[in-house]
Every structure is written in structure tokens, then in C-alpha cells.
Image (cartoon, rainbow, N blue to C red):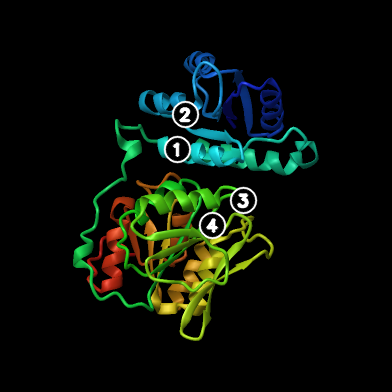
């Protein structure tokens, strides 16, 4: 079997050595080159033609984001960013995902040796996902705009306050979630979101979305009343669950064990929505690798929810939607550009089936 070939780009010799050791210890991948800056990397890409890049952000001679933007315009290929766990690092990471990076990992700490095995598993998993991800050419101006058509929100009336929107995503999900939320009106139903993301990034993700959207977006703190026009994102350290207190929907956080290797888990959120929202929920499963969310979405479907899955063509990775579709949990398959409009149409009862299962 052909190994996944990886080019490591980082200005730190120590980090280059560490990443090379981690990647070369995997049976299915190998480092075919390591570059100290983007200019050296550019020549190595031409000569070595790697399957995946790992890319640092802050480097000499050319900023990692500038390099990424040029790369995705001229020669799009799978990139996993190696990012610092800082506020600036978070902002830069989301910009990188906007430009077309498939995923990111936190930069290893200098005392990482005691947790090297878990860190290595994370990097290896994300490189594997990146190697099969759908990478698109970055068009001029596309990284500063949202994709698709804005739904005619003025036409959507009469949405019940009992309704909820429940969203799950993984790889590629930060941009997919943004492309859905920016098109939702300020009076839309409350939204709960589980996106696979490590602690330290979910708050920045929520703040970024809050600046872009008409609705209010926040990292969930647990114990909040779920309000219309508000979206609650699972923090990177906890499962997010829906609960009920009398007539009110509430959020709850749990530090229970990971489910499908994830905390937050989409299955945990979807299962709670099935239990407490039932037919009042619209479930949405977006791009991502693996099967997290499929079983929970089936429970939602059986409880009367209407479920939408992102289609293969618009997904960075079609794994999670495919798994949900395969077990009969999905009512409709929708392109990302149409997702917000289909959600609103379903909530108002003006349903025009795009693709029925």
C-alpha cells in the first residue's frame, strides 16, 4: 500500500524533528521532506509532490497564511495547520481554515514527551483525513465572502418558539457552520452545535461567528435557557446536551467520557435532542470524518425530528453525513449553499423537497 507522503514546514528545527519522528512512526505515512520556510517548501512541493502538508503559521521570509493563500489559488492541496494555543493563534487558525486548510493541530509543547503518544495519534488521524479530503481551488475574493445564496428570510414567518435547530460537524465544519449561520435571521429558533474542536479554540470560534452573524453566537456555559436567535456551541472540553426545565429548553454540559473518541460528541447532543425536543427539532449533520452523529441522528428521526445532511459534493469529508444516510437517519440531502434556506423552509412548513431519501 502506498504511504501518505507528508511535507513538514516549520521554522523550528526541534518541531520539524518531532513531527518527522511522529509521522514516520506511523505504518501508513512518511515524511518525504522538511522545510524551514515557505520559499524552501515551494521548491520541495514542485520536486516531491507530497500528498499532505503540515504548515506552521509564523515563519521567516513568508507568513504561513500568505503562503497558504498562494498555494490554494495556484496548486490546491491538503494542508494541516500547526497552530499555537493563543488568542492570536486561534484567529490565525480560523483564517487558515477559511483559506482552505483541511484541519489544524495545536503546536506541541517543548515538554510534550510525556504525552507524545496521544499527540501523535491526533496528528496522524488528521493527516489521514486530510489525505482523502476534498480540496478546492481558492477563487479571488472567496475567502472574504460566504458561499451561496442568502435565503429570502423575509418570506419565513410563523416559526414556533418550540422549534430547535441541532447541528453537528467535524472536519471542514468550522466553515460549513459559518456558511449556515450567517444566513439565518435574528428571530430563528435556538441552535445547539457540536463541532469537534479542542479546548482553547471553541470560544474564539463562537466569538468569530458572533461578529459575522445576525444571530447571537456564544460558547455554551451550561445551564442557559435556549433562546430564539441564539446559537450555543459546545466547548472543546465538554459534551453539550439539551435538557428541559418546565416549558424551557436548557443547555447542560457534561465531562463524561468521550463518545466515538470525541468530547464534545455529536451523538451525545443528538441523543439529548431526540429525548427532549423530538418532532420540534431540525437536525443537521455537516462535513466530517467518521460516524459520530449517525446513531444520535437516527434517534432524532425516530423521535419525529426532520433531518438534513450535507451532500458529498459540498463536503470537505463526507464521512459523517454518509454514515447517517446509510442507516436511514436522514430525510433530505442538501448542498451547503442551500442548507440555511432548507432549514428555514422546513421550520415554516414551506417544504420543497430537494433530495428525498
Say what secondary structure mark 2 lies in: helix
Q: Are marks 2 and 3 in contact (CB under 8 Å)?
A: no
Dot 4, how many residues are within 10 Å of its Cα: few (below 14), some (14-19), or many (20+)? Answer: some
Asked whether, in this view, residue 113 is left or right of residue 106, the answer is right
Q: Of marks 4 and 3, which one's residue comes earlier in the chain?
A: 3
Residue 289 seen: no
Q: Which mark is drawn over residue 199? A: 3
Name the residue that disc number 1 marks: 95
- Rendered image: mark on residue 65: 2
Quickly name the residue at label 4: 291
Local secondary structure at mark 3: loop
Check disc 1 and report its element: helix, strand or loop.
Answer: helix
Residue mark closest to the camera, 4 vs 1: 1
- Res 127 seen here: yes
Q: Which one is closest to the eye, mark 4 or mark 3?
A: 3
Looking at the image, which is closer to me, 39 or 126?
39
Quadrant in which the N terminus is drawn: top right
Q: Residues within 10 Å of mark 1 (few under 14, many from 20)?
A: some
Q: Position of residue 349 (x, y in %)?
A: 25, 74
Q: Quadrant of residue 334?
A: bottom left
Tell me the distance, in whole angstroms, between the alpha carbons under discs 4 and 2.
Answer: 31 Å
The first of marks 1 and 2 along the sequence is 2
User: Is residue 111 shown left or right of residue 255?
Assistant: right
Q: Calculate the distance from the C-alpha at mark 2 to the C-alpha at mark 3.
A: 23 Å
Q: Is residue 29 above or below residue 126?
A: above
Amino acid at each position: 500500500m502506498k504511504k501518505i507522503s507528508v511535507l513538514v514546514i516549520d521554522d523550528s528545527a526541534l518541531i520539524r524533528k518531532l513531527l518527522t519522528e511522529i509521522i514516520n512512526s506511523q505504518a501508513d505515512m512518511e515524511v518525504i521532506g522538511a522545510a524551514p520556510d515557505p520559499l524552501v517548501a515551494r521548491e520541495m512541493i514542485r520536486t516531491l509532490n507530497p500528498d499532505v502538508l503540515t504548515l506552521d503559521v509564523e515563519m521567516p521570509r513568508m507568513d504561513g497564511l500568505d503562503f497558504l493563500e498562494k498555494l490554494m489559488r495556484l496548486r490546491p492541496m491538503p494542508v494541516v495547520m500547526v497552530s499555537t494555543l493563543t488568542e492570536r493563534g486561534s484567529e490565525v487558525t480560523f483564517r487558515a481554515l477559511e483559506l482552505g486548510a483541511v484541519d489544524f493541530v495545536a503546536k506541541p509543547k517543548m515538554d510534550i514527551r510525556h504525552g507524545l503518544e496521544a499527540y501523535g495519534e491526533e496528528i496522524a488521524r488528521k493527516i489521514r483525513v486530510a489525505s482523502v479530503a476534498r480540496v478546492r481551488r481558492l477563487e479571488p475574493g472567496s475567502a472574504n465572502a460566504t458561499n451561496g445564496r442568502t435565503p429570502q428570510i423575509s418570506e419565513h414567518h410563523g416559526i414556533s418558539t418550540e422549534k430547535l435547530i441541532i447541528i453537528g460537524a467535524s472536519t471542514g465544519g468550522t466553515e460549513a457552520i459559518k456558511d449556515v449561520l450567517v444566513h439565518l435571521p435574528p428571530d430563528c429558533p435556538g441552535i445547539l452545535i457540536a463541532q469537534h474542536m479542542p479546548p482553547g479554540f471553541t470560544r474564539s470560534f463562537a466569538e468569530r461567528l458572533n461578529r459575522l452573524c445576525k444571530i447571537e453566537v456564544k460558547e455554551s456555559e451550561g445551564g442557559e435557557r435556549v433562546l430564539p436567535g441564539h446559537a450555543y456551541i459546545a466547548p472543546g472540553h465538554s459534551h453539550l446536551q439539551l435538557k428541559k426545565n418546565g416549558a424551557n429548553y436548557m443547555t447542560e454540559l457534561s465531562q463524561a467520557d468521550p463518545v466515538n473518541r470525541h468530547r464534545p460528541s455529536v451523538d451525545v447532543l443528538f441523543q439529548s435532542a431526540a429525548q427532549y425536543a423530538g418532532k420540534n427539532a431540525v437536525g443537521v449533520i455537516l462535513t466530517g470524518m467518521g460516524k459520530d452523529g449517525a446513531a444520535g441522528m437516527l434517534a432524532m428521526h425516530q423521535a419525529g425530528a426532520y433531518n438534513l445532511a450535507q451532500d458529498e459534493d459540498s463536503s470537505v469529508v463526507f464521512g459523517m453525513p454518509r454514515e447517517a444516510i446509510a442507516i436511514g437517519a436522514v430525510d433530505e440531502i442538501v448542498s451547503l449553499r442551500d442548507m440555511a434556506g432548507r432549514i428555514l423552509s422546513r421550520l415554516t412548513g414551506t417544504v420543497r423537497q430537494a433530495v428525498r431519501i
